[in-house]
Amino acid sequence: MEKKLIIAIDGRSSCGKSSFAIEIARKLDYLYLDSGAMYRAVALFCIRKGFASGERVERESVIRSLPEIDIHFSYNHSEEHYETFLNSENVEWDIRTVEVTRAVSSVSAIPEVRDRMVELQRKIGFFKGIVIDGRDIGTVVFPDADIKIFMTATEDIRAGRRHKELMEKGIKTDIEEVKRGIRKRDKADETREASPLKMADDAILLDNSNMTIEEQMEWFMEIYRRVVSGM
């Protein structure tokens, strides 16, 4: 049997990290953990409680509420995708709204929130055989991950992907607004005090602006076979 790995995928918003990570997990029969969905679930919880709205966040209220928050994932075989559960409620669609997107950076910037999520992520990944995507996976959550990838794409490509995703979900929005949101998210991710977005020194860069998911998988499998053969 091949040794199980921890595969960490970091990168900017709307560059296809989740789709890529899910395909890898399916190919290797690994567990997929969407760290971004965890932070979105916390943001949704805070919005519902009135602790967050846009960039406004009641820091102390959020911190006090952390013990009330439980997040887990379940694979929906009929729909063939992973779903996010917040306190036993399926919130997979609720966490993808523009309202949550506007609040998630402020909520996730709170160190206590990140500490709690990192604790849960490490617990899930203890036995390896996991693919996890986010913004600080290879630098903070799993600095000793077996494979680290940093994904990016041009702003226009990322905005187009995000706009298409929202439209397919029936959420009407202007693409220029999506671009502004991406720029703001990038700045917030890169300049936040707690675990800012950055490429790990030993990560491999993947610019998928002009790549299909099939091409990305071919690229990944070459790296995977090289790593496994060297173990």
Image (spheres, rainbow, N blue to C red):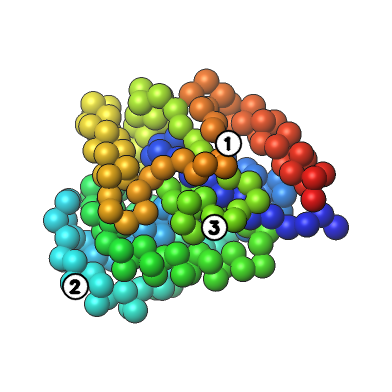
Task: Using the image, determine if residue 101 lies above or below residue 155.
Answer: below
Q: Nearer the viewer, mark 2 or mark 3?
A: 3
Q: Residues within 10 Å of mark 1 (few under 14, many from 20)?
A: some
Between residue 147 and residue 78, name the one nearer to us: 147
Residue assigned mark 1: 204
- Secondary structure, mark 1, is strand
Upstream in sequence: badge 2 or badge 1? 2
- Secondary structure, mark 3, is loop
Q: Which mark is residue 142?
A: 3
Whole-percent x, y for residue 80 in the image: 59, 50
Going by the numbered disc 3, the residue's amino acid type is Phe
Separation of marks 2 and 1 at Cα, in angstroms: 39 Å
Task: Check if mark 2's residue and mark 3's residue have beta carbons within 8 Å.
Answer: no
Task: Using the image, determine if residue 27 lies above or below residue 142.
Answer: above
Going by the numbered disc 2, the residue's amino acid type is Ser
Q: Residue furthest top?
A: 210
Residue drawn at the location 54% of the way across and 55% of the way down: 143
- Secondary structure, mark 2, is helix
Upstream in sequence: badge 3 or badge 1? 3
Upstream in sequence: badge 2 or badge 3? 2
Residue drawn at the location 17% of the way across and 51% of the way down: 54
